[in-house]
């Protein structure tokens, strides 16, 4: 498989999970789109490792490999196809590598919302700093919190009730798994700062928040809204309003 074909397979996997991006990317300058999609595809690799089901050992080994790969990016060396796009960017890759073990710990059910966010805080901060370099936008505590909230929302979508904090399960309606999941989705939305980061992050965050809002209403994944609604929401996110 050529490097180009291998890269396309990772980018296409991300686009398949986020078909909304087809509408949103029109607000991203053409020259910036390859880095944005490659970056989000990398974060999806980390999400998949965090949300693995079954035997975690292969995923843990893959995460350790990624740690070494990111450290190599800091030395201008890369092996992974995504590195062909991302490694030349002057981002703090080694610092991000140091936070990857938090993804393993995040598989355990946290005690409450505070513990859930604290468990991924260092990772969210490292991603925020890397994005500040990639997208020439300021990093902030609010951006890190938004990134962490999106990671937790993805975990809810992928792991279901296994992602629920212990306290939220106890206070939810007894035996109603859908109510428990909806309640956790609503909590995540309240803890998710809007309109943070560069344009690329704001667009992805708007897409992810839209999914979580629909989940909070139904307790399960819901169909995407119409293209007109997606385009309007992307326009708002792009302008920061």
Image (cartoon, grey):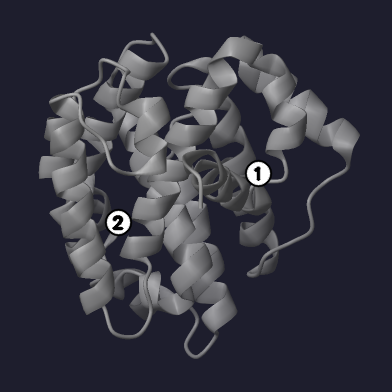
Neighbor class of circle 2 (other Cα within 10 Å; few <14, some 14-19, many 20+) is some
* Image point (38%, 67%), residue name: 51
Residue 224 picture location, percent across and down: 78, 51
- Relative to 153, residue 86 above or below: above
Identify the element where label 2 is drawn: helix
- Kindly check if marks 1 and 2 are in contact, taking CB atoms under 8 A apart as contact: no
* Image point (54%, 15%), residue name: 32
- Relative to 28, residue 215 above or below: below
Would you name the residue on which mark 1 appears?
210
Along the polypeptide, which appears first: circle 1 or circle 2? 2
Would you name the residue on which mark 2 appears?
113
Quick check: 157 left or right of 78?
right
Residue 223 picture location, percent across and down: 79, 58
To which quarter of the image does residue 116 belong?
bottom left
Neighbor class of circle 1 (other Cα within 10 Å; few <14, some 14-19, many 20+) is some
Which label lies toward us, 1 or 2? 1
Quick check: 212 left or right of 26?
left
Residue 215 picture location, percent across and down: 64, 60
Query: In the image shown, does 187 or 17 lie closer to the viewer?
Result: 17
* Image point (44%, 73%), residue name: 159
Quick check: 33 left or right of 55?
right
Report how far apart the C-alphas of labels 1 and 2 lie in the structure: 20 Å
Whether residue 241 is visible, yes or no, is no
* Image point (38%, 30%), residue name: 84
To which quarter of the image does residue 65 belong?
bottom left
Spot the residue most to the front.
Answer: 2
Query: In the image shown, does 201 or 97 lie closer to the viewer?
Result: 97
Whether residue 185 is visible, yes or no, is yes
Residue 96 picture location, percent across and down: 19, 36
The quadrant of the image that shows the C terminus is: top right
To which quarter of the image does residue 208 belong?
top right
């Amino acid at each position: 498989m050529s490097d180009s074909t291998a890269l396309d397979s990772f980018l296409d996997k991300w686009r398949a999970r986020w078909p909304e991006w087809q509408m949103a990317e029109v607000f991203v300058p053409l020259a910036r789109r390859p880095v944005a999609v490659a970056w989000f595809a990398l974060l999806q690799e980390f999400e998949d490792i965090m949300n693995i089901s079954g035997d975690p050992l292969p995923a843990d080994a893959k995460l350790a490999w990624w740690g070494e790969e990111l450290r190599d990016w800091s030395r201008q060396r890369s092996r992974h196809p995504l590195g062909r796009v991302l490694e030349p960017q002057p981002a703090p890759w080694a610092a991000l590598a140091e936070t990857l073990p938090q993804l393993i710990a995040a598989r355990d059910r946290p005690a409450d919302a505070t513990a859930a966010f604290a468990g991924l805080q260092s990772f969210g901060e490292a991603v925020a700093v890397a994005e500040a370099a990639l997208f020439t936008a300021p990093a902030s505590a609010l951006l890190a919190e938004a990134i962490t909230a999106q990671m937790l929302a993805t975990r809810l979508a992928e792991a279901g009730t296994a992602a629920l904090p212990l306290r939220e399960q106890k206070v939810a309606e007894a035996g109603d798994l859908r109510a428990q999941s909806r309640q956790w989705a609503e909590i995540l939305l309240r803890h998710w700062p809007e309109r943070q980061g560069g344009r690329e992050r704001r667009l992805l965050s708007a897409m992810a928040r839209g999914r979580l809002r629909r989940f909070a209403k139904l307790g399960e994944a819901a169909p995407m809204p119409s293209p007109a609604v997606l385009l309007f929401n992307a326009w708002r996110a792009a302008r920061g309003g």
